[in-house]
């Protein structure tokens, strides 16, 4: 028996993964959608563009779901850390982030998105592969992907450049480093020295932790 992508098991808010222009024998040419509230298939009035379910390739996920999960998961820790950093800044312990940068984000909404993502992550144990190898894990994984993608889209965090305190430039040894925001979540932060004639650039700042590493190297 071929295992199918978990999305074919009627997960709320998740479209089943199907092959385009390929149909199951019982397809009548029309597209239907599952109504979870009424617990029944409902006609959409649109033609079916493909209803043959996609096969599971990694655990219970098809290639598309697996690739989307990997991409969403790769950004997750950083996204959550940045949002939490802003949250802390608003609550007083500014952690080196200027309070004004928090004005760009709707924190209440942020918290809801983070909570949704975390609720799905709760079943994750071990590797992503082992997470998606069980049915409850695979269901949570595709819902995590959808929630994380929605969070990344709806919370375009515009961070301003942040002057780093208590950290010294490795070149000129002055407290003149400024962390510039990444262009997007796939990009790295850059720390740039503001001293005239120095302008040292430090890249590969995947997380705030590496700021502590600068401190260690300089100290
Ligand atoms: Zn069809
Ligand atoms: Zn899929
Ligand atoms: Zn410098």
Image (cartoon, rainbow, N blue to C red):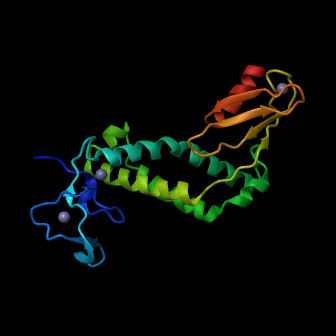
The image shows residue 157 at horizontal and vertical percentages of 65, 53
Question: 127 or 157: nearer the eye?
Answer: 157
The image shows residue 170 at horizontal and vertical percentages of 79, 22
In the rendered picture of this protein, how many numbered marks are placed on residues? 0
Question: 122 or 74: nearer the eye?
Answer: 74
Q: Is residue 156 left or right of residue 136?
A: right
Q: Is residue 15 above or below residue 37?
A: above
Q: Is residue 86 left or right of residue 174?
A: left
Question: 5 or 113: nearer the eye?
Answer: 5
Image quarter (top left, top right, bottom left or bottom right) of the C terminus: top right
Which of the 4 quarters of the picture holds residue 181?
Answer: top right
Q: Residue at x 24, y 60 (%)?
A: 9
Which of the 4 quarters of the picture holds residue 168?
Answer: top right
Q: Is residue 24 above or below residue 61?
A: below
Q: Residue at x 86, y 22 (%)?
A: 172
Q: Residue furthest right?
A: 196
Q: Is residue 36 above or below residue 115?
A: below
Question: 119 or 170: nearer the eye?
Answer: 170
Q: Is residue 120 visible?
A: yes
The image shows residue 146 at horizontal and vertical percentages of 42, 56
The image shows residue 161 at horizontal and vertical percentages of 77, 44
Q: Is residue 91 visible?
A: no
Q: Is residue 61 above or below residue 178?
A: below
Q: Residue at x 13, y 60 (%)?
A: 24
Q: Is residue 136 left or right of residue 215?
A: left
């Amino acid at each position: 028996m071929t295992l199918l992508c978990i999305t074919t098991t009627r997960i709320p808010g998740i479209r089943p993964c199907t092959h385009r222009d390929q149909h199951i024998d019982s397809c009548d040419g029309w597209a239907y959608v599952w109504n979870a509230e009424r617990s029944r298939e409902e006609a959409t009035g649109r033609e079916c563009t493909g209803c043959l379910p996609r096969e599971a390739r990694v655990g219970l996920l098809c290639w598309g779901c697996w690739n989307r999960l990997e991409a969403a998961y790769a950004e997750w820790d950083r996204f959550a850390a940045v949002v939490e950093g802003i949250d802390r800044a608003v609550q007083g312990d500014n952690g080196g982030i200027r309070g004004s940068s928090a004005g760009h984000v709707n924190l209440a909404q942020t918290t809801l998105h983070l909570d949704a993502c975390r609720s799905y992550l709760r079943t994750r144990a071990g590797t992503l592969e082992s997470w998606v190898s069980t049915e409850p894990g695979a269901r949570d994984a595709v819902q995590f992907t959808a929630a994380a993608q929605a969070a990344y889209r709806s919370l375009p965090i515009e961070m301003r450049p942040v002057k780093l305190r208590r950290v010294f430039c490795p070149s000129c040894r002055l407290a003149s480093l400024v962390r510039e925001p990444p262009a997007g979540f796939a990009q790295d932060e850059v720390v740039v020295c503001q001293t005239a004639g120095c302008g040292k650039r430090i890249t590969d700042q995947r997380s705030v932790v590496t700021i502590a590493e600068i401190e260690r190297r300089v100290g």
